[in-house]
Amino acid sequence: MGQNKKIQILLSTYNGYKFIKTQLESILSQENISDIKILVRDDGSIDETKEYLKAVSLEYDFIEVIFGKNVGVNRSYFELLECADKNCDYFAFSDQDDIWLPFKMKRAMDFLDRVSEFQKPCLYSSRSEIVDENLEHIGEVLNPIKPVGFYNAVAQNVMPGHTQVFNRAALEMTLKHGYHKNIHVIDWWMYLSVAAMGEVFFDPDITVKHRQHSDNTVGYRINFVEQSFARIKRAFSDERNKPALQLKAFSDLYYDDMPEEYRTEVRSYLSGLKKFSDKIRYVISAKAYRQSGFETALFKVLYLFGKYKI
């Protein structure tokens, strides 16, 4: 399964010279992959990353590099989606400083091939091992306790972008609906979009060694206590409105195409942000959930007391 499929890796770089070589080597070492392309977009690096990418693109004809201005991680990855080879069957996001385990892409394609005949948008994600700069073990990303799907994606992202692999239908669907400036995190956006319009899969196995260091754009908490304290901290920071703004952006672009039950959830969530009586109504009827009862309760309390605004 998947051995004859065309794959393109979408990799955004920014000052990643220290680790980019080992990540590319791990991509090139994938098992049972016969047709792979790599599309890199450099987001305005000022270290030696650009020089390295120029050299490696001359060495390998299947590596294409785009040198762009600094637009930030979300816009950079969306530009990669826009420039992706539409003839490929599968696409994968990649961080610049991770290490992919040799079976990562084969395992992802085995999951996705199960529903490929339906030609619907599909997204795969998996667990990761968290390592430090020297690849020393720190911990592991938690396995979701509850099912992944749209109602989880409304309130929480549990599908790390550095593990995400998706089919052509997911790419085309994402491009059709377009980019929005209020995308909070691109991998959360992909989770929300594909969960609404297709099918998502979470693999409990570990397929990536994810470096956690000071230069990471996003850090991943590896236990329940750390996750909970991090969420409480964000709830009272300037970050607290971004998930609500993202959901409003998602509604602006996807509302007419979503199933009615999902439209009802999004409509109730957004209307409740304006009126207290609607807040109560939504908290009582909400289908949105996070991966633990505590986090779901915290989400509803914060929502009820107006901590999310648009």
Image (cartoon, rainbow, N blue to C red):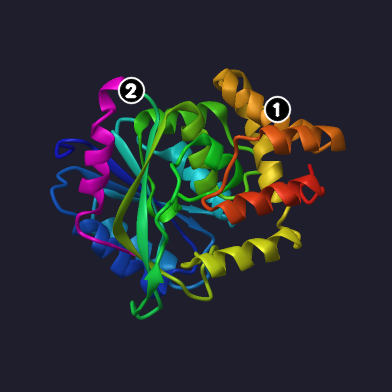
Q: Which quadrant of the figure contains the N terminus? A: top left
Q: Is residue 104 above or below residue 225?
A: above
> Vertical placement of 74 versus 231: above or below?
above
Q: Tell me which segment is drawn in magenta.
A: 99-118
Q: Nearer the viewer, mark 1 or mark 2?
A: 1
Determine the CA span between mark 1 and mark 2.
28 Å
Quickly name the residue at label 1.
Answer: 267
Mark 2 is on which residue type? Gln
Q: Residues within 10 Å of mark 1 (few under 14, many from 20)?
A: some
Is residue 133 shown left or right of residue 24?
right
What secondary structure do most residues of the magenta stretch adopt? Answer: helix
Q: Where residue 305 sits in the image (x, y, percent)?
A: 81, 49
Q: Nearer the viewer, residue 134 or 73?
A: 134
Front residue of 181/152: it is 152
Check if residue 113 falls in the magenta segment.
yes
Give the total number of marks visible in the rendering. Answer: 2
- Residue name at image x 48 percent, y 34 percent: 195
Asked whether residue 236 appears in the rendered view, the answer is yes
Q: Is residue 28 left or right of residue 309?
A: left
The image quarter containing residue 248 is top right
Residue with the mark numbered 2: 119
Residue 241 in sight from this viewpoint: no
